[in-house]
Amino acid sequence: MDLGKRLLEYYGTFMAEETRFLRNTCNGKLSEQACEDVAQEAFMRVAGKAVAGQLGPDVKIGAYLRTTSWNLAVDTLRVQNRTDLMEDTALVAAPDQRGEDVDPLKELVRPAIEAMPSSRRRTVVRLQSQGLDDAQISAALGIAPDRIHRDRYAAVSELRSKLGSFIRDGHRKKTRRAKEDR
């Protein structure tokens, strides 16, 4: 049977089951309408991939849809949590002692990047701090995207250790080394 036909035949079952599944799995953190929206978006994305020929003919439609909807639900919850945190008055930044606004990127991060030894790692993190995504950085430097990821991870780890004293206690990454450094 054609992938498109299988997908269309599965639509009703998927929408009925997935909304309930997401609502239960997210412990009510997403409204029923949000769960419906997530399921609909997942279906549209999978349908788009099917139309574009990005899915094989033997793909398990149910499993693929479930994974897609779950990933979208997790993304939705993350956005919701970020919004909740931003609205929390306990996380309002302390006023600058100098009485002027401080731009951490400009005053802390970029100088720390420029202080790093000249390397591809430094170049990757500098380009990222300017707003470029992995594909743009990869094209600019002529290296593979997976290498970009590794270089950025190493550079961010290095910057985190250098800038650790500027990170509030509750927001520091919990690692064994961080406990030893304190």
Image (cartoon, helix red, strand yellow):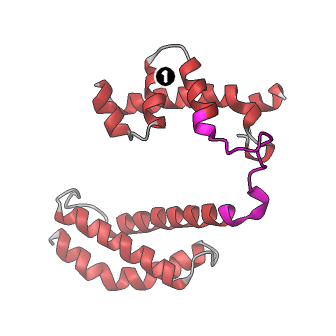
The reply, left or right, for residue 128 in relation to residue 177 is left
Horizontal and vertical percent position of residue 105: 58, 37
Q: Amino acid at mark 1?
A: Arg
Residue located farthest toward the top when viewing the structure as drawn: 117
The reply, left or right, for residue 171 in relation to residue 57 is right
Considering only vertical position in the picture, is 111 above or below 65?
Answer: above
**Residue appearing at x 22%, y 75% in the figure:** 6
Magenta stretch holds residue 92 = yes
The quadrant of the image that shows the N terminus is bottom left
Magenta stretch holds residue 168 = no
Considering only vertical position in the picture, is 148 above or below 168?
Answer: above
For the question of whether residue 175 can be seen, the reply is: no
**Residue appearing at x 78%, y 49% in the figure:** 94
Q: Dot 1, crowdedness within 10 Å: few (<14), some or many (≥20)?
A: many
**Which one is nearer the viewer's eye here, 59 or 169?**
169
Q: Quadrant of residue 13?
A: bottom left
**Residue appearing at x 37%, y 70% in the figure:** 42
Horizontal and vertical percent position of residue 89: 76, 63
Identify the magenta region: 85-106
Q: Quadrant of residue 52?
A: bottom left
**Which one is nearer the viewer's eye here, 59 or 41?**
41
Horizontal and vertical percent position of residue 167: 73, 39
Horizontal and vertical percent position of residue 55: 23, 58
- Labels in figure, total: 1
User: Residue at label 1?
Assistant: 122
For the question of whether residue 137 can be seen, the reply is: yes
